[in-house]
Amino acid sequence: MTATRTEPLKAYWQPGCSSCLRMKEFLQRHGVAFESINVLADKAAFADLARLGIRSVPIIRRGDDWANGQVLRDVARIAGIRWGGSRILPPEELQARLTLFQAAARRFLAQLPDDALPAMLPNRPRSYASLAFHIFSIADAFLDHELDGTRLDENAYNRVPGPGKDTRAALTGYGEAVARRLENWWAVHGSKTDWNRRADVYYGEQSVEEFFERTTWHCGQHVRQFMMVLDQLGITPQDRLGPEAFADLPMPEKVWDDEPGPATRAS
């Protein structure tokens, strides 16, 4: 069903969600007014989405016409924005950036004090330990897709460490295992990958190249959050990543969503 333009545009999001922040910044850059709905603060929001069979955010919606906010061309369609396409870095550069981000996450994890591992991110039920796990698991989920043919489903980015797996040693071991798996995949399959092949992902129509780009910048955004955490703890990130590490990746401008309140109107 195609909604009329008289119906309000709604953007559903949650704090700390990289694609949520990116979706809202995209709308704001184009001067599009929208109702901003934080699903963690607005208890009716998920019920509203469930009526349409939606179980995750970010979501852009106008009436019953909606799209997952992880794909900006779909956001543009719902919002009435002319889509001009996008430029993707070459796979070799994406691989280099992803490897850089994974190494940074392991390095920053080593700097976290033990008593900070269970601390929570602002307005989001995600611990610092889970943030590190999430960065590693984003790359792992891509490798599951490419090596094992595993579909990226709605739970892929909600993985959390199992019992006893949120220790520094366990997290470091997981990060190192993902790094080895990433290196081996690239060495064996990188030059043979069909980057135009359609990826089997839950959030919309994507090529493997687009999925790889999304994996890379997604990790990069959370690495920026990791540096934010260390700064807030008064710890200088070792070999801090500068702007050049994130250049030409389609990332949010902000590190963290600072929008307050359960539901506000933005423009």
Image: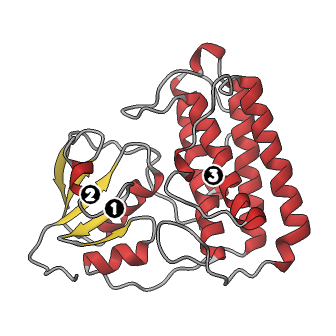
Q: Say which residue label 3 marks.
A: 138
Estimate the x, y position of residue 62 in percent, counting from the top left. Answer: 20, 71
Mark with earlier residue (3, 1): 1
Indicate the quadrant containing the N terminus: top left, top right, bottom left or bottom right: bottom left
> Neighbour class for label 3 at 10 Å: few (<14), some, many (≥20)?
many
| 67 to 178, vertically: above or below | below
Say which amino acid is labelled 1: Ile
Secondary element at image label 2: helix
Say which amino acid is labelled 3: Ile
| 54 to 173, vertically: above or below | below
> Neighbour class for label 1 at 10 Å: few (<14), some, many (≥20)?
many
- The answer to whether 167 appears left or right of 265 in the picture is right
Secondary element at image label 1: strand
Indicate the quadrant containing the C terminus: top left, top right, bottom left or bottom right: bottom left
Q: Residue at x 32, y 62 (%)?
A: 53
Q: Does the CB distance between marks 2 and 1 fall below 8 Å?
A: yes
Secondary element at image label 3: helix
Q: Residue at x 65, y 75 (%)?
A: 208
Estimate the x, y position of residue 147 in percent, counting from the top left. Answer: 78, 64
| 226 to 186, vertically: above or below | above
Q: Say which residue label 2 marks.
A: 49
